[in-house]
Every structure is written in structure tokens, then in C-alpha cells.
Amino acid sequence: MIRALRSAVVAIAAVLASFGAMYVICVRLDVNPSPAILAAALTVGLMRRPERLDSRSLLVKLLALPLVALAAGLVGFTFRTAPFLGATIFSCVIALSIVLRGYGERAKVIGRTIALPLMAILVVPLRIDDSHGGLIPALLMIAAGAIAFASTTAVWWLAERAGIEKARQAPRDARTRRAPRAGELPVTTRMALQMLVALGLAFAIGMLLIPAHWSWMVLTAFIVCSGAVGRGDAIYKGLSRLAGAIGGTLVAAIVAYAQFPNPGAYAALVFFVLFVGIFLRQINYAYWAACATLIFALLQGWEGTSVGPLLAIRVLCIAIGALCAVAATWFIYPIRTEAVVRRRVADALTALREVIAGHPDDPEHPERLAALDGHAAELRRIAPPVRLHRAVFGAKDSGEHPATWIDLSHALLLQARTPGFDRVHVGAEMRRLRAMLQGRGAVCARGGEPPSMHSSEPNDTV
């Protein structure tokens, strides 16, 4: 909890720094402060997964983010003048950002950099008076990207120096990658196609049936589909997003009737909810979904309509967006949840075997232990949906349920991190767990290769 609180404090400090710097620029130029909100939204996304990148990747991000922010702003303007063209460009670029993640770490950085401003534009549509001409909006969008990057880098550097946060290297894939079989699409391509279908459905339904609120539908489809590790994970994320949205909507209905003395108090409420959301996100995603829904509602306002029907429509849009994402992950090159669990557990056991076979004085022993931590994190990532399935539906034989495999794997990884652990006992438990896996078929015999956890991390700003 203390670590989550420290991370939330660091993140909100970066957000306030970027918002404040951009707000001053907007006031000096006498323009609407929406670019300041855009800079804050970009910072939220950047602080979601702060990484210590090598110099080249850092330079790529520094140059790319302002330019991509400009391009995203142009896409946002296209939504006003030619909505379906904007939807097509948006969906294709997001899909491209996912495909890039399969071409190395720098391409992965570019992919995340491309996706982030586009999602921020959905949350914070730019509203700049046309009387300023085209140059000022373009410069403001570039400035928003540059300030978000600078604020994130500076605050994270200060947090490291103060000992508040530990340095983090770019994520290391703990698994051995398997080349796609003949005729099999790469994982990132499959995920890109799922995202393309999910966004296409959300845009089509939203723009045709509920044109005033299509962004809620598209945003939810992206969040649920982004990084969905298997069909079960997509359903779990969809339920979490919907539950959080309902909670956030109920709070938003109350806030709608509150009176604020000035815009500053209203802004303070938004940042407070953001801080709470960042803190609780590390406990359960549903809390973040609730806070994000409330923030989104506060930013968009009530548009002079009755609060109750408006919020009900927004919840409906979130539900439809979640269904679009679930449908895409279930029917477009689907990945079975059991296949994902099998692969993760098998990879964890392989890394564990290397630790048992090695010696504590071996120079590579710390690296092997770090790999165990990476596998433990991956298992935690995929555990909630299968544990929910076991709690709701049970299992005829608990040893055959994927949630049991994860629990046993976690216990073994924890033992291996204990100095002087019983290698004979751990080895016997490993063989028993492998027997459970083999009792239900070969690892990933069906469902294909599950996606890389690092390449599938969501880039959600909300």
C-alpha cells in the first residue's frame, strides 16, 4: 500500500507539473485550456509505465511524442469534419501501433507513443478557437506532447534521486519466444486485427446510433481489447470496466448537483479523483474504471441535459463498447485462456528449473531470480479471470483447473526465492504440476501462442 501511495504521489506531481506549465501558455495566448488537459492526459499515460530507456529509445520518444500529438490533434479535427474518415484513420493507426510492438524494443516504444496521444484525444477533444489560425493550434499540440514528456522525465528523475521510486529498466521478456508456425499469424498481428474489429464495431454503432456519445463506446472498446490476454481476460476486463463505470456514474450523478465556488475548485476535484484512481488502480482495475468514468464525465460536462438520462446513456455506451471488444477477442483469431495459463506456467517452471540446477554463488544467479520475479508478475496478471471462473463455476477436479496451476506455481516461485529452500521438495512439486498440465494435453496445443505480456500492456489514459 505504501509503495502504491508513493507511486500515486509521483504520478500526480508529474500531471500537475505538465498541466500547470501548459495552462500558463494557454493563458498567455488567450486560448481555451484544453491543450493543458491534453498534456495532463498524456502524462497520465506516460506515468502508467515509466521506463529507463537507452539513449536512442529516449531520443525516439522525445522526437516522436510531440509530432504524434500534432497528428492526433489533426485526427481529432477530422472527427468534426469527416467523422467516418477520422474513425478509419484512428482505427488503422491504433492497429499499426500494436503491430509495431513485435519488432523490437524501439519499435515497441514508437507503438506506445503513437497510441497514447490518440487515446488522449478521445478523452480531451481540443477546442481551440479558429480565429487564432491554424499555426497556434498546431504549436499548442506539439507543446502539449513536449511538456508531457519533459514533466514525466523530470519528475521521475527527481523521484529516483530522492529514493521515492526505484529505477526501472525497460521490460525484459522472461519467456523464450516461439516463432509462428507455418501459416500462423504473429501474435501482434492477431491482436491488431482484434483491435481493428473492436474499434470498427464501436465506431459504427456509436456514430450511427448514438452519435453524441460515440467516444465513450470507442474508449471502452480500446481499453478492454488492449492487452487482453485470452478470451477470459477480455470478459473480466469488460466486467471490471462496466462495474467501475456504474460506480463512477452514480458518484457523477451526485457531483452534478454540487455547487463549486470557482473553476479552481472544480479542477481540484478532478485532480483529486485522478490521484485516488491512480492509487487504487494498483489494487483493482475496477476502482480505476470508476474514477476514470467520473473524470471523463466531469471533463465533458452535462451539456445542459438532465443528468440521469445522460449518465444512463453513457453507461449503455460503455456496455456496448465492452461487448464490441469481447466479441472481437472471441471470434477474431481467439486465444483460449487455458492455453495462456499453460504457456505461462510452463515458462515459469522452465525458469524455476534453471534456478534449482544453478548455484547461489553463480554470477548468473541474480539474473535467474529476477526472471522468476518476471514470471510471477505475468502469472499475477492472468490470475484474476481464472480465479473468478473457479469461484463462480467451481471445478470437478481442482487439480485440473487453471487457477490451481497458477496458485501452485506462485507457491513454488515464492519458495525458490527463500534462501536455503528445499530443492528436493520443490523439484517434486514441479513434477507434480507438470503432470497436471500434461493430463490436459500439451502446452498451448490449442489456441495458439499467447501474447507477450510486455507487448500487450494497455496504453490506457483512462
Image (cartoon, grey):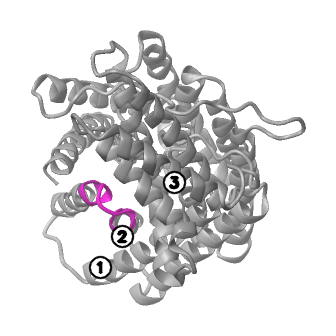
* SS at badge 2: helix
Q: Is residue 215 visible?
A: no
Classify 283 as above or below 251: above
Q: Nearer the viewer, mark 3 or mark 1?
A: 3
Mark 1 or mark 2: name the one nearer the start of the chain.
1
Q: Identify which residue, 337 or 24, lies in the foreground.
A: 337
Magenta region, main secondary structure: helix
* SS at badge 3: helix
Asked if disc 1 and disc 2 are in contact, CB closer than 8 Å, the reply is yes
Identify which residue is drawn at 51% across, 81% down.
394
Count of numbered badges drawn on the protein: 3
Q: Report the residue that reaches farthest toward the front.
A: 424
Disc 3 residue type (three-letter): Leu
Splitting the image into 4 quarters, where does residue 397 fall? bottom right
Q: What residue range appears in magenta?
A: 278-290
Splitting the image into 4 quarters, where does residue 108 fall? top right
Mark 2 or mark 3: name the one nearer the start of the chain.
2
**Position of residue 377 measured from the top left corner of the image (x, y, whole percent):** 40, 45
Residue annotated with mark 3? 433
Residue annotated with mark 1? 251
Q: Identify which residue, 218 or 26, lies in the foreground.
A: 218
| Residue 395 in the figure: left or right of residue 270 | right
Residue annotated with mark 2? 290
Identify which residue is drawn at 16% across, 64% down.
262
Q: Nearer the viewer, mark 2 or mark 3?
A: 3
Splitting the image into 4 quarters, where does residue 413 fall? top left
Disc 1 residue type (three-letter): Val
Disc 2 residue type (three-letter): Ala
